[in-house]
Image (cartoon, helix red, strand yellow):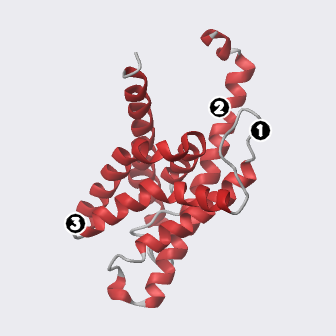
Amino acid sequence: MRIQRPILLLTAITTGYLTMFAATFWVLMPVQQNLSSNFLPFAQITSLIALTHGVRVVVTWLWRWQAMPLLLPGAAIEALVLQLHFNLPPSDCLLMTAAFATNSFIAFELARVLGWNEYASPEKLANWRSLVLIGILASLINGVFLAQMQVGNGDPSLQFWLAANVLIGDTFGLILWLLMLRTLLRVVLRSGLLSLWN
């Protein structure tokens, strides 16, 4: 039983992560490309609503350091799909995997070291604004990782636009994800579904 629970948790998180990635990459991005590819830099390669970032932040909020191995399979598959789609070198795949699996934990830990501990706890209510702020910090850390990739032949202006698009996409994706999660929690609480687990 002790072995089954971590496997079920890992499966659930990986499934959720990949579902959000599929929604972002194969649904939202094509719409974005059709609407804005003529005037928005990097519209072809970054999404302005990155739903996977919401998964990373919430999973890290709930499971702290354990979020990194829990996020790793989804992050690795996402990075592999991006590598194959954009014909990136294997080193970029490894870099993206590391970035996606660790950026939220690094952000939460930086905040904790500075006296701002926002990990989930039974003693306090969720602070959605704090989660968004930590998500923005995680996105900045993500940008530092991704800046190491050879996008735009190292042109600083292109690197800036890439980082800006990633920050915007991660932030909007996190906010949308938190709104969906909050709505789901309200529905569950009002419907009495939690009583089924007692």
Residue at mark 3: 90
**From mark 1 to mark 2, how far is it between C-alphas?**
16 Å
Secondary structure of the residue carrying tag 1 is: loop
The residue sitting at 44% across, 30% down in the picture is: 9
Up-down relation of residue 159 to residue 195 (above or below): below
Secondary structure of the residue carrying tag 3 is: helix
Closer to the camera, 86 or 98? 98
Determine the image quadrant of residue 37.
bottom left
The residue sitting at 31% across, 50% down in the picture is: 77
Can you give x and y, in whole percent of width and height, for residue 146 in the image?
A: 41, 71
For the residues bearing labels 3 and 2, Cβ distance under 8 angstroms:
no
Looking at the image, tell me whether mark 1 or mark 2 is earlier in sequence order. 1
**From mark 3 to mark 1, how far is it between C-alphas?**
42 Å
Report if residue 36 is visible in the image. Answer: no
Q: Is residue 190 left or right of residue 37?
A: right
Disc 2 residue type?
Leu
Q: Residues within 10 Å of mark 3 (few under 14, many from 20)?
A: few
Looking at the image, tell me whether mark 3 or mark 1 is earlier in sequence order. 3
Residue at mark 2: 184
3 or 1: mark nearer the eye: 1
Can you give x and y, in whole percent of width and height, for residue 187 in the image?
A: 69, 26
Can you give x and y, in whole percent of width and height, for residue 67 in the image?
A: 48, 44
For the residues bearing labels 1 and 2, Cβ distance under 8 angstroms:
no
Can you give x and y, in whole percent of width and height, for residue 107 in the image?
A: 58, 60
Report if residue 138 is visible in the image. Answer: yes
Determine the image quadrant of residue 168.
bottom right
Disc 1 residue type?
Leu
Residue at mark 1: 125
Secondary structure of the residue carrying tag 2 is: helix
